[in-house]
Image: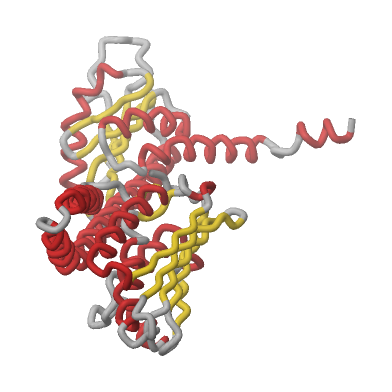
Amino acid sequence: MARWRWRRTSLGGEADRAAFRALHNASLASPALREGLTTASAERSVRHLRALLGTPAAGLGDTSGLLAWDGLGSHHRSQLAGTIGQVAETGRTMIVDQRTLVCDDGGCQVRQAIVSPLVVEDTLVGALVVGAPHTTGGLVRAADEVASWVSGQLELAELDLSRTRLMEAEVRALRAQISPHFIYNSLGAIASFVRTDPDRARELLLEFADFTRYSFRRHGEYTTLAEELRSVERYLLLEQARFGDRLQVTLQVAPEVLPVAVPFLCIQPLVENAVRHGLEASADKADGVGRLSIIARDHAQECVLEVEDDGTGEDPERVRQALAGDTSMDSVGLGNVDARLRNAYGDDYGLVVETAPGAGTKVIVRVPKFAPGVQV
């Protein structure tokens, strides 16, 4: 019985319950607003904003007019379009009375309206409209506070969009860094088989086409580890066509991690670095062979991937410079991949590089199996 009484009073008094309702409605409106101010997002969020304010009507509009309306008094929408334009010019909250909201319906609950500006990065992008039988100072302040919160959500949407554009630019830069020498060398290797082994030349040409199709088509921000490793296999087939027995590759992948989402083109640059550095040392070895291993393991809530070569190794200080984005370093995309991993999963998930001169190099990538906002 004591437990039952505690549960009934767990939300406290009316003030606590009101706060809970407000937070709940805000959380329902937030996902749509984080997509930006569009007709679709306005229609999905405006009903929750009206519930948050507790008014008979509410609307959202951009600088051209109303995008969505919820509640009573929808016949006033056309009358409010001009007011939104005035708010866009002045940047100040306006109160609209019966002189503008002309209505023949004696029982209409929308006799006045508050139009509060929505501002993103000092630019007015639209307005929140609150319709009520009459306005009070408290309602005006509430409308302005909600408009300020909506502006914050729209600003976050703009930041998300900017982040997406930045990630796309980084991937384009990485493609440009990878493609020139690899394409030239691959086509040269394929050409060497055209007369001596036409069937193999054909197979390699198809592998090259599939590799470039994957690398240069427009992707989302993420792909599966299976897709990424399939592209890596094609890359390695082309490199082995060039180097023959001088390049030996070991690949071990746990099936459990194949569906894990990873940033697009986050593995291939690491493999390319390993091939290049591994083969640099092969000429000085007794057997003249460069060795590369790729291991993907299932580790609790994470996927752990290791790319290791037995090449010349590197000065750790130079690796730190490459991870910091120093483009003068002879490392394909190392800083790019590290930055995208950190952006996606947090600073705990940056690249770990174990290396020393003459000791080879191992690059470790840890990726959570599930992360908020990460999906293929």
Query: As drawn, is 81 to the left or to the right of 35?
Result: left
Outermost residue toward the front in this view: 196
Let me know if residue 296 appears in the view. yes
- Count of residue discs: 0
Q: Quadrant of residue 134?
A: top left
Q: 127 or 319, which is in the foreground?
A: 319
Is 279 situated left or right of 305 in this image? left
Picture quadrant where residue 137 is located: top left
Residue drawn at (44%, 63%), measured in percent from left and top?
250
Quadrant where the C terminus sits is top left
Where residue 269 appears, as percent x and y from the top left, is: 31, 66
Residue 226: x, y in percent? 41, 48
Q: Depth check: 154 or 216 in front?
A: 216
Across and down, in percent, residue 303 comes to 52, 56
Residue 271 position in % (x across, y down): 35, 66
Q: Residue at x 74, y 38 (%)?
A: 10
Seen at 41% across and 89% down, the residue is: 357
In the image, is residue 28 above or below residue 91? above
Name of the residue lying farthest toward the right:
1
Residue 205 vs residue 344: left or right?
A: left
Of residues 55 and 343, the one nearer the viewer is 343
The quadrant of the rendering that contains the N terminus is top right
Question: How is the model colour-coded?
Answer: secondary structure
Tell me the residue at 14%/58% (across/down).
Answer: 196
Looking at the image, is 167 positioned above or below residue 277? above
Q: Is residue 91 visible?
A: no
